Image: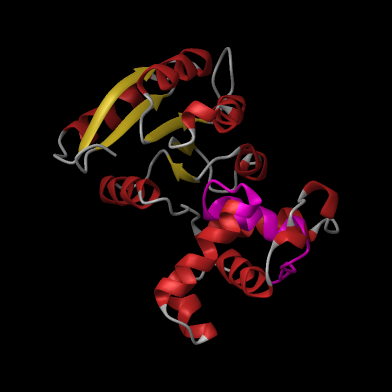
Amino acid sequence: MTDDVIRVALVDDQALMRAGFRALLDAEDGIDVVGEAADGERGLELIRARVPDIALIDVQMPVMTGIEATRRIAADPALTTVRVVILTNYGHDEYVFEALRAGASGFLLKDTEPADLLQAIEVVARGEALLSPSVTRTLIGEFVSRPPDRSTAPGLENLTRREREVTALAARGLTNEEIAEHMVISPFTAKTHVSRAMTKLGARDRAQLVVFAYESGLVAPRTSC
């Protein structure tokens, strides 16, 4: 972020949807909409040119899907600071798991309340994951149906005991403060452990830690979720 202004790019094939989001975001002093695009390919070009802090990307678009665009953003070394929030019409979208694996930092329903949208942008801009309870249940449900596959989540052996513990707690949705209380350590120490775990695993944010924790078997799904 520059001078505490959150720079946002809008990528959605519905012009009315883009206009609505832009009108809301432009009214906020701390948010700057740097551009918009109507499909994934043009969106990727926009993001590469402007390097926003946040990219709001529709999951289903012509030319290139939001998931593919997210995958390319996550793979581009020049875009490591860009956080992707996927826009979807459904709380239990079938693409939730795939998009998180591609590198998305979270999801927003297109009919979300304006105040919730603004809060979500601030949360993701801080580097935190945006996973609503419904999306988390969808994600965990994906793992309930199949056993862990450690081959898809390498790096567990590189984590210390403490780092494994904080990764598991973060995957359960605990904040740094809650992790600190659970482990009887300071919030700063908890944050340090989380940051080191993310660095070792190459995780962009906590959403990626959730994926890793379940894929590696570090956290077992709760079938009651």
What residue lies at 42% left-to-right and 80% top-to-bottom?
A: 186
Is 25 situated left or right of 192 in this image? Answer: left
Q: Which scheme is used to colour this image of the protein? A: secondary structure
Q: Residue 197, percent across and down?
A: 60, 60
Q: Nearer the viewer, residue 190 or 223?
A: 190
Q: Residue 133, percent across and down?
A: 52, 61
The answer, for residue 132, to whether it is visible in the render is: yes
The quarter of the picture where the N terminus appears is top left
Quadrant for residue 141, please give it: bottom right
Quadrant for residue 148, please give it: bottom right
What residue lies at 59% left-to-right and 23% top-to-bottom?
A: 65
Q: Residue 118, percent across and down?
A: 28, 46
What residue lies at 59% left-to-right and 25% top-to-bottom?
A: 72
What residue lies at 44% left-to-right and 19% top-to-bottom?
A: 48
Q: Residue furthest bottom?
A: 184
The quarter of the picture where the C terminus appears is bottom right
Q: Nearer the viewer, residue 55 or 17?
A: 55
- In the image, residue 224 lies in the stretch drawn in magenta: yes
Stretch in magenta: 200-225
Q: Residue 169, percent across and down?
A: 59, 72
The answer, for residue 175, to whether it is visible in the render is: no
Is 79 situated left or right of 24 in this image? Answer: right
Is 86 situated left or right of 163 in this image? Answer: left
Label total for image: 0
Position of residue 217 relative to residue 8, above or below, is below
- In the image, residue 82 lies in the stretch drawn in magenta: no
Q: Nearer the viewer, residue 177 or 146?
A: 177
